Image (cartoon, helix red, strand yellow):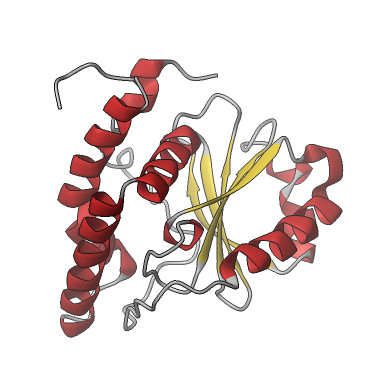
């Protein structure tokens, strides 16, 4: 399990020289933010069942994260799912089964918690694959649970998402630029979420 320091530290390093995270590079597309859909939890449950059928005991943990996991929060209509496997770098142990399930490997980042990202063939899911020692899935859950509890930060994030989507679409940017436009607000919310969870002790 990662340390508290790992969970509360952000790693923004660029890829090593000559390396790229992209297996399938992103393209600029309009970014649509829609109102929360009550069907999203059920859609996650369907995807969780599908992934467990294909990977069986190789699923150490799986969780619905991201904006579609927060009731009342507008979001891109794409589920974010964190999948924990024993060793993400051992792709032959888990990737073929997910390929058979219709997922496509799009990102490979050995330098960042051995992260891999796969997309569903219909683009409805981003499946993030991590190992047991990765801190990032813990961040995702802390952020999710904080937004579920805190209406002010939920609305603050909703406004930031809409503004970032509008600007990114207007400028024909990729989802990576959209994510960067939200980063300042995301980090502010994380600071409050970490304090609420007892991971940091700075005054509110």
Q: How far from the left and from the top, in percent, is residue 153?
A: 25, 50
Q: Quadrant of residue 34?
A: bottom left
- Relative to the observer, which residue lies in front, 31 or 46? 46
Residue found 32% across the figure and 47% down from its top: 150
Q: Quadrant of the C terminus?
A: top left
In the rendered image, which quarter contains the N terminus?
top right
The structure residue drawn at horizontal position 18% and vertical position 60%, both measured from the top left corner, is 181
Residue 43: percent from left, percent from top: 65, 68
User: Number of labelled discs?
Assistant: 0
Report which quarter residue 11 is drawn in: top left
Residue at 36 percent across and 48 percent down: it is 147
Q: Residue at x 33, y 42 (%)?
A: 15
Query: Is 157 placed left or right of 171 in the picture?
Result: right
Q: Nearer the viewer, residue 81 or 200?
A: 200
Q: Residue 61 appears at what percent x and percent y?
A: 68, 38
Q: Give above or below for 3 relative to 39.
A: above
Percent coordinates x, y for residue 195 in the rendering: 27, 26
Residue 61 or residue 88, whichever sits in front: 61
């Amino acid at each position: 399990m990662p340390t508290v320091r790992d969970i509360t530290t952000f790693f923004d390093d660029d890829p090593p020289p000559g390396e790229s995270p992209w297996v399938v590079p992103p393209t600029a597309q309009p970014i649509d933010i829609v109102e929360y859909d009550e069907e999203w939890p059920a859609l996650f449950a369907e995807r969780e069942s599908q992934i467990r059928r294909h990977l069986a005991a190789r699923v150490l943990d799986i969780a619905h994260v991201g904006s579609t996991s927060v009731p009342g929060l507008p979001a891109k209509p794409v589920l974010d799912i964190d999948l924990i496997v024993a060793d993400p770098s051992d792709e032959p142990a888990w990737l073929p089964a997910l390929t058979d399930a219709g997922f496509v490997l799009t990102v490979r980042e050995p330098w960042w918690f051995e992260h891999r990202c796969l997309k569903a063939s219909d683009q409805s899911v981003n499946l993030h694959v991590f190992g047991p020692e990765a801190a990032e899935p813990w961040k995702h859950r802390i952020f999710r649970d904080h937004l579920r509890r805190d209406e002010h930060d939920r609305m603050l994030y909703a406004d930031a998402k809409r503004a970032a989507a509008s600007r990114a679409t207007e400028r024909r940017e990729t989802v990576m630029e959209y994510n960067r436009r939200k980063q300042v607000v995301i980090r502010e919310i994380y600071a409050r979420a970490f304090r609420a969870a007892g991971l940091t002790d700075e005054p509110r």
